[in-house]
Image (tube, rainbow, N blue to C red):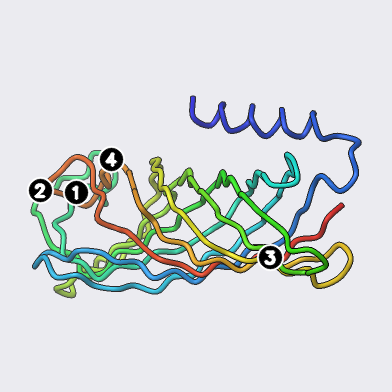
Amino acid sequence: MKKSIIIIVIAALSTSLFGQTEKFSGGLLFSPEINIYEAEDNNKKLSLNYRYGLIGEFKINDYIYLQTGISHIKQTYDIHRMYDYCAFNSPGEPCLEILQYVSTIDYNVISVPINIIIKTSFKDSKLSPFVLLNTNNNFHLLGKYHDAYDSNVNELREFKYFGNTGSIALGIEYLLWDKLKIDLSTQLRIIEYRKKDPIVYEKEDKINTFNNASLSISLLYTF
């Protein structure tokens, strides 16, 4: 359902803007992100990750823009959690169902953002400040779990689940050339929702402790 809504929104905007010049910009996105998370001992820890991808921007009017695209980020956390050891066995293979701990968890995430940008321009200036409201639709595709006790568990297991994040950002756009512009913004995540990891055991069915701040850099060409 959520994926269908995204597709409908993108298709509707593409149809309404088709044939109109200087209504669409497309380009590259790069974003270093500092993740704040809570370890088993309730201490806060930091993790630096990097997001990159493609982004498209639709001009609604002189002040409002809509962005979407696709990006990838690999998130790594040093966090102690119990995991289901039997989940790594082949179907039908006997297992003692012993729970063990992991010390490092890697996630590979594909994100489809929907951004609303409110932008203003200074007269005869190449600078345009803006406010950005973001929601990211995240698809967690792969997980890698490193065991804390050297029991040779270093498995890459495929699984899929869905999550959402919401952020707010302040930024500035600079016109490099006639149709080439660069956007710089500082972004703060204000909410996150994601389902429980199917392998790693959590106390709650849903976890929302992973919040972050980021610096987003976009290079866009206006068609």
Disc 3 residue type (three-letter): Glu
Residue at numbered disc 3: 173
Kind of residue sitting beneath label 1 = Cys
For marks 3 and 1, give the CA distance. Answer: 51 Å
Secondary element under disc 2, as helix, strand or loop, is loop
Q: Residue at x 51, y 51 (%)?
A: 110
Q: In the picture shown, does residue 83 fall above or below 10? A: below
Residue type, mark 4 in image: Pro
Q: Say the numbered circle drawn on residue 48.
A: none
Callout in the foreground (4, 3): 3
Which residue is painted at 71% across and 50% down in the image?
Answer: 56
Q: Secondary structure at mark 3?
A: strand
Which of the two labelled residues, at mark 4 and mark 1, occupies the earlier sequence position? Answer: 1
Residue placed under numbered mark 2 in the picture: 97
- Tell me the element at label 4: loop
Q: Earlier in the sequence, mark 2 or mark 3?
A: 2
Residue topped by disc 1: 86
> Where residue 13 sits in the image (x, y, percent)?
73, 33
In the image, 56 versus 94, the foreground residue is 56
Q: How many marks?
A: 4
Q: Residue 75, image x and y in percent? A: 39, 64
Q: Which image quarter: residue 196?
A: top left
| Of 52 and 33, the residue lying toward us | 33
- Mark 4 and mark 1: Cα distance apart in space: 10 Å
Crowd around label 3: few <14 · some 14–19 · many ≥20 (10 Å): many
Graded by Cα atoms within 10 Å as few (under 14), some (14 to 19) or many (20 or more), the crowding at tag 2 reads few
In the rendered structure, the answer to whether residue 169 lies left or right of residue 221 reads: left
Could you say where residue 28 lies in the image, as x and y percent from the top left? 69, 62
Of pointers 4 and 3, the one earlier in the residue sequence: 4
